[in-house]
Image: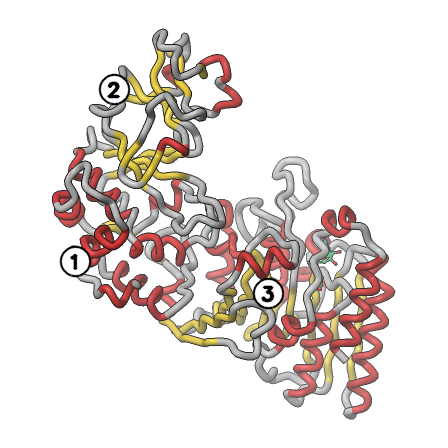
Amino acid sequence: MIEAAELVQTEYLNTKSGVERKELGQYFTGSAVADYMASMIGPVDTPVVRIIDAGAGVGILTVSAALRCLEMGNNQVHAVLYEIDGNAVAHLEVNMKHVARQFRKQAGKFTFEIRHEDFVLSRPDKTEAPFHVSSINPPYFKYNAKTSPYAGAAADLYKGNPNIYASFMAVVAACMAPKGKMVAIVPRSFTNGLYFKGFRHYLNQTMSLDKLHIFRSRDKVFKALSVLQENIICSYTKHRQVARIEVCTSTGYEDLNQVETRRYPAKLLIDTTNEHEIIRIPESAKDAAILQTVEGWSSSFLENGYFISTGPVVEHRTREYITTPDDKADSVPLLRMHNVKAFKTVWTGSNRKDARFRLLDGHEKHTLENQPYVLLKRFSSKDEKRRLVAGIHDPQTIKGKLTALENHLNYIGREDGELDLAEAYGLAVLFNSTFMDKYFRCISGNTQVNATEIRLLKLPTREVIDQVGATFPDGAESDQQRIDSIVNFHLKVKESAVA
Ligand SMILES: C[S@@+](CC[C@H](N)C(=O)[O-])C[C@H]1O[C@@H](n2cnc3c(N)ncnc32)[C@H](O)[C@@H]1O
């Protein structure tokens, strides 16, 4: 039955161009994933189960969810399905009729209503009776926070306009009856992105996160599906947060029948110690042990008095200031991503990407005091092993009146004055360690390293950071093993817990 629905889906998609599909965010769910999502739905204690589908496509998720209800003994089901694309509606109807037939065969009753409407703008939470079950794969795209009709469409639920998929999840959550279940396959970005802060707060207040599924070989899975975002499956119930959350992993979509499951305390995953309420996802028991160690640290990036900012030189806006390495006339080296290596910043003037920054009128907006900083690359490529790469900017090595840092770099210093070089080394050892890289990956699935995420990191105290720095004198060899053994020793982490 579900395979037949998938066939209808393929036939339908073949009639659509790539451009049309992209506009409506039409990445449809395969039958294995649809069934897996439905398996997260437990028995429902009500005579008629009401299902809501938001952005139904041809209805594959509701097919699976309804059949799951039937299997659990809930043989009276009513589904309300929202789909904006008129061309999908006829196919949706065919699939729903198949489901109704299947229910009749098993002495059950399945009824449905298709709403050819905009789900977010219709706000069914305000007009429909509450629902018990929802399995969704919403569209995702950013919209203009000033001009889009979606801007503020869910403002009574949460603050901000991060991405359309958040509006879908928020409205579905609002549609649910107490103990109602929402299973969603969505980008991972909501778990930590700054723009999703208001949305996370709403979700954490309204729903309990019961289960998360992540894919270990994300690059392969999502590239194969032509989906650029990393997706996760999350399962929420409308009641107070449960004490433990299940984290499931599989390599990809093919091995969803061999999922590994672990249970963790909710507070290890949902960080409620600050207003950002970031959701951290340990991919393995070792990652969870790392999170646990970090929880035990008594300090944080901010409590230690550090600041992090993004390099002020935006090249396309400062073209007239940028010059060649041999143009020495009142200029300083411009530090770009390629100049930053682990522990050092190398600017010789002989790399073809090296450039200088002229101190023309108005340069003050783009230049900094030439002081010691820890430089953190903001971007890593998918193929790079490490997310965090920390170099040190030493004013004795790259001399000059001022420093010019390009926008693809973050720089770390102290709020209360100059960062001491020994402390800078301590911080760089920490950031370049496997331990911190893994900690960071629990927080962010993105290859970008944002200043906001670093600002929220827990850290060891400054004393420990100084001790780490002292064992790593400037110019020392920086092989990973040595960095890791220094960090593990000072953080009292067993080598086997990280490797
Ligand atoms: C990612 S697809 C998923 C479809 C289906 N649920 C599945 O899992 O295969 C999202 C669907 O939402 C529909 N859609 C996009 N914007 C919508 C809106 N504002 N209201 C209702 N449906 C919308 C698209 O046409 C598309 O069919």
Kindly give the residue lying farthest to the bottom in the view shown.
Answer: 107
Evaluate if marks 2 and 3 touch, with contact meaning CB atoms under 8 Å apart.
no
Residue 176 in sight in this render: yes
Residue 174 appears at what percent x and percent y?
60, 62
Q: The residue under label 1 is which amino acid type?
A: Phe
Q: Which of the two discs, 3 and 1, sits closer to the camera?
A: 1
Q: Residue 124 falls in which quadrant of the image?
A: bottom right
- What colouring style does the render use? secondary structure
Given residues 55 and 413, the one toward you in this image is 413
Q: Which residue is mark 2?
A: 399
155 sits left or right of 399 in the view: right
Q: CA distance from mark 2 to mark 3?
A: 53 Å
**Element under label 2?**
loop
* First along the sequence among labels 3 and 1: 3
Given residues 106 and 495, the one toward you in this image is 495
Residue 197 in sight in this render: no
Q: The residue under label 2 is which amino acid type?
A: Lys
**Element under label 3?**
strand
Residue 489 is marked as: 1
Q: Which residue is mark 3?
A: 184
Q: The residue under label 3 is which amino acid type?
A: Ala
Kindly give the residue lying farthest to the front in the view shown.
Answer: 350
Q: What residue lies at 80% left-to-right and 69% top-to-bottom?
A: 113
Q: What residue lies at 27% left-to-right and 45% top-to-bottom?
A: 301
Q: For the image shown, how many numbered marks are present on the structure?
A: 3
* First along the sequence among labels 1 and 2: 2
